[in-house]
Image (cartoon, helix red, strand yellow):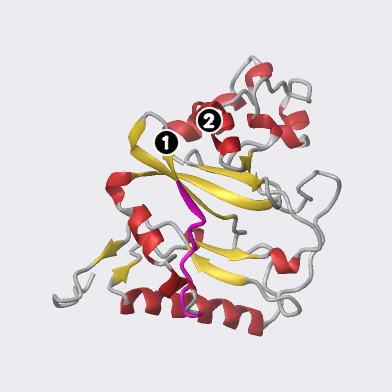
Amino acid sequence: MGDFEYHDRIIGPLFSSNSSDLYALSKSELWWSSHFEYLKEHGYMMRPRYRPGWKASFKPGILTALYSEDGQTILHPYVMDALRISDSYMVAMKRVKVSTGEENIANFFSNEEHNTNPRNRCIRVLEVLPVPGNNDEKIIVMPWLRKVMDPRFRTIGEAVQFFQEIIEGLQYMHENNVAHRDCARNNMGMDANPMFTRQYHPIKPKKRHNWSGRALHHSRTRCPPTYFLIDFGQSRMYNPSQPRPSE
């Protein structure tokens, strides 16, 4: 989240005298909302907050918004959650600049050769959508991943599995002449669907997706998740015929 976005969505409302504007759609949310019908036509349904004609179900005020499903804003201006209409599978839709090459690297590790390799820990691309009227951006559709630290690790073995998969994934990228170059905790995620008895909410993951109660889960030991590397905006692919650089 950029500084201006952070101020507009977090800092600004705290000092606003007009509490009714506290959870109005931000500029980035309006962008997604304006593409609702386009994304629906391609098989993806965004939450009620981003549907045409949305009106808040909560009264003005920060507490009522925080405890309402349609008061939950997106975590990042360029990433939107949605459900795949065909099977209610939760996905992440990310706006990317074509110039960054992120789409190319993500697609490279999502092709049939790499997608079937168990050592490949790069998030797979489900679909790439063009942005109507904008040739400089595309929308990458991927599985929605949960933060790797939630829920917490309970055993040493669970932590070992996490490190083993991530290190193995980085090694696999390097073997294929790609450097991630931004391997921070926020750029890792886990497919935690096997752990949860019911689908969790993307913004309030301790709650069920339909906001009907707490999202209960099994331990990582009983139902192991799968860990992935994400966000290839800083990644770089190198020519295999040339000496490997050291960065």
- Magenta range is 118-128
Spatial CA distance of label 2 from label 1 is 9 Å
Place of residue 216 in the rendered image (x, y in percent of width and height, measured from the top left): 82, 61
At 63% from the left and 44% from the top, the residue drawn is 82
Q: Which residue is drawn at 27% across and 46% down?
A: 99
Residue placed most toward the observer, 6 or 224: 224
Q: Residue furthest left?
A: 242
Q: Which of 147 and 17 is in front in this view?
A: 147
Circle 2 packing at 10 Å, graded few (<14), some (14-19), many (20+), is: some
Q: Are marks 2 and 1 in contact (CB under 8 Å)?
A: yes
Q: In this view, does 205 lie above or below 65?
A: below
The one nearer the camera, 10 or 157, is 157
| Residue 233 appearing in the image | no
Q: Vertical placement of 80 versus 171: above or below? A: above
Q: Which residue is drawn at 71% across and 50% down?
A: 88
- What secondary structure predominates along the stretch shown in magenta? loop
Residue placed under numbered mark 2 in the picture: 35
Circle nearer the N terminus (2, 1): 2
Direction right: furthest residue: 213
Badge 1 element: strand
Q: In this view, does 162 lie to the left or right of 229?
A: right
Q: Quadrant of residue 223?
A: bottom right
